[in-house]
Image (spheres, rainbow, N blue to C red):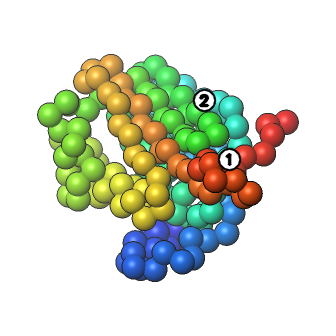
Amino acid sequence: METTIESLLWLARESDTSDKGTATDLLPSVQNAIEQNRHLLAGKPVEISLEVESTPILSAPAGVFAIAVSNLIRNSCQFTTRGQIVVTLKQNQIEVSDAGVGIAADTIDEIVKPDVSSSSSTGFGFGLDIVNRLCSRFGWQLKIDCKQGHGTKTSLIFQEDYPGSDVKKAWTRPVW
């Protein structure tokens, strides 16, 4: 609840772009989001896995990133009834791929708007809207690829100013 309120307060302060927070290590947030949503898979023949290709660090509050990634993972857990969910952490993005029901092509643009949810959703239809607004606020991109009946891949693509370079990319540290 605290991270949700923090995220909403960040969105309410949209005009203030000077303080985006301290450096946040994304791996612990991703691991925590997976564990917090694992209960949604109880009784389902679904396997969730984490693939770590890189361990990015962003200049954003940990709670804000946690809200965004948890929403993507929660959606995959909710709409996947069998198969796999793969969460992949890369240098400049995180991907959540599932074998769920997918999203109809004619609603893909609408799904990120407020108060829009699928008929099988148990939520209120604000999750992806919040993620989309957080992406706009922090300069990230939300990308949704899907084929109805064959799953969905959602990606949070983030870029940061890399210290000492005019190249835009996420800060990373080696994977040990």
From the viewer's side, name the closer residue of 157 and 45.
157
Quadrant in which the C terminus appears: top right
Q: Position of residue 162 (x, y in %)?
A: 68, 54
Looking at the image, how many numbered discs can be counted on the residues? Answer: 2
Location of residue 9 (image quadrant): bottom left
Residue 101 seen from this side: no
Q: Where is residue 69 in the image (x, y as percent from the top left)?
A: 50, 49
Figure check: 168 above or below 102: below
Q: What residue type is labelled 1?
A: Pro
Location of residue 115 (image quadrant): bottom left
From the viewer's side, name the closer residue of 100 and 94.
94
Q: Where is residue 85 in the image (x, y as percent from the top left)?
A: 50, 28
Q: In this view, does 129 lie to the left or right of 23?
A: left
What's the residue at 54%, 77% (across, down)? 18
Q: Is residue 102 left or right of residue 11?
A: left
What's the residue at 69%, 53% (across, down)? 165
From the viewer's side, name the closer residue of 99 and 147.
147
Q: Residue 99, which numbered label?
A: none
Which residue is under mark 1?
56
* CA–CA distance in space, label 1 to label 2: 18 Å
What's the residue at 31%, 56% (across, down)? 129
Q: Is residue 96 left or right of residue 31?
A: left
Which residue is under mark 2?
49
Residue count near mark 1 (Cα–Cα under 10 Å), binned few <14, some 14–19, many ≥20: many
Q: Are marks 1 and 2 in contact (CB under 8 Å)?
A: no
Q: Position of residue 134 (x, y in %)?
A: 42, 61
What's the residue at 55%, 40% (across, down)? 94
Q: Which residue lies furthest to the right in this view?
A: 176
Figure check: 19 above or below 50: below
Dot 2: element: strand
